[in-house]
Image (cartoon, rainbow, N blue to C red):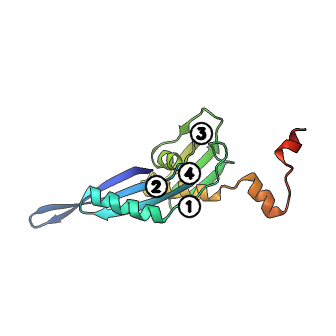
Amino acid sequence: MEKTVFINRCAKVVKGGRRFSFSALLVIGDKNGRVGFGFGKANEVSEAIRKASDRGRKSLQAVALQHGTIPHEVTGTHGGGCVFLKPASPGTGIIAGGAVRAACEAVGIKDVLAKSMGSSNHANVLKATLAAFAQLRRREDIFRARGITLKPAAAAAN
């Protein structure tokens, strides 16, 4: 799944007039716990999107999800961008805007509360969101790292 976050038009003034070039920021995900982003620049929009898509496919990273949401609260920063993500109960939906919403949809999160603070630069907000995703850990993974064994679900219910 690809979602276009932002397309920027840049103008260079030359003797005959203006020459336009474009940059595209994309989020790529499989809606099943993997997400990445790509940034491409070219003289045409379609070429910029293609370049961004190719770069995004190479930068996929795994994200720990739990029942359609995230396992715990997390804050990610990059540059001036700061993103706060909080798990939400089923049926809440994605309460986020712009780059954060696109990243959450691409990774497969269905319920989350988010707040973007600081910079509103699309690239920094997106990178801060991916930094927050990288900090997520499941309970089982933390216990395994500490050497704690969990009781099986059937035995815990009895």
Task: Decide which of tag 4 and tag 2 comes sooner along the chain.
Answer: 2
Q: From the top left corner, tell me how far across and down residue 114 is, in percent.
A: 57, 44
Relative to the observer, which residue lies in front, 57 or 36? Answer: 57
* First-in-chain label (3 vs 2): 2
Q: Is residue 7 above or below residue 153?
A: below
The amino acid at mark 2 is Ile
The CA span between labels 4 and 1 is: 18 Å
**Label ID, residue 61:** 1
User: Going by the image, does 60 lie left or right of 138?
Assistant: left
Which amino acid type is marked by label 3? Asp
Side of 22 relative to 35 (left or right): left
Q: CA distance from mark 3 to mark 1?
A: 20 Å
Q: Which of the two discs, 4 and 1, sits closer to the camera?
A: 1
Q: Residue at x 59, y 33 (%)?
A: 92
- Spatial CA distance of label 4 from label 3 is 16 Å
Element type at marker 2?
strand
Q: Residue at x 79, y 60 (%)?
A: 144
Label 3, on which residue? Answer: 111
At x 74% / y 58%, what residue is drawn?
Answer: 141
Q: Earlier in the sequence, mark 4 or mark 3?
A: 4
Is residue 91 or residue 18 the one in the foreground? 91
* Location of residue 132 (image quadrant): bottom right
Earlier sequence position, callout 3 versus callout 1: 1
Q: Is the Cβ of the residue at disc 3 closer than 8 Å to that at disc 1? A: no
Label 3 vs label 2, nearer the camera: 2
Amino acid, disc 1: Gln
Distance between the Cα atoms at labels 2 and 1?
Answer: 10 Å
- Return the residue at label 4: 83
The residue shown at (56%, 36%) is 93
Q: Nearer the viewer, mark 4 or mark 3?
A: 3
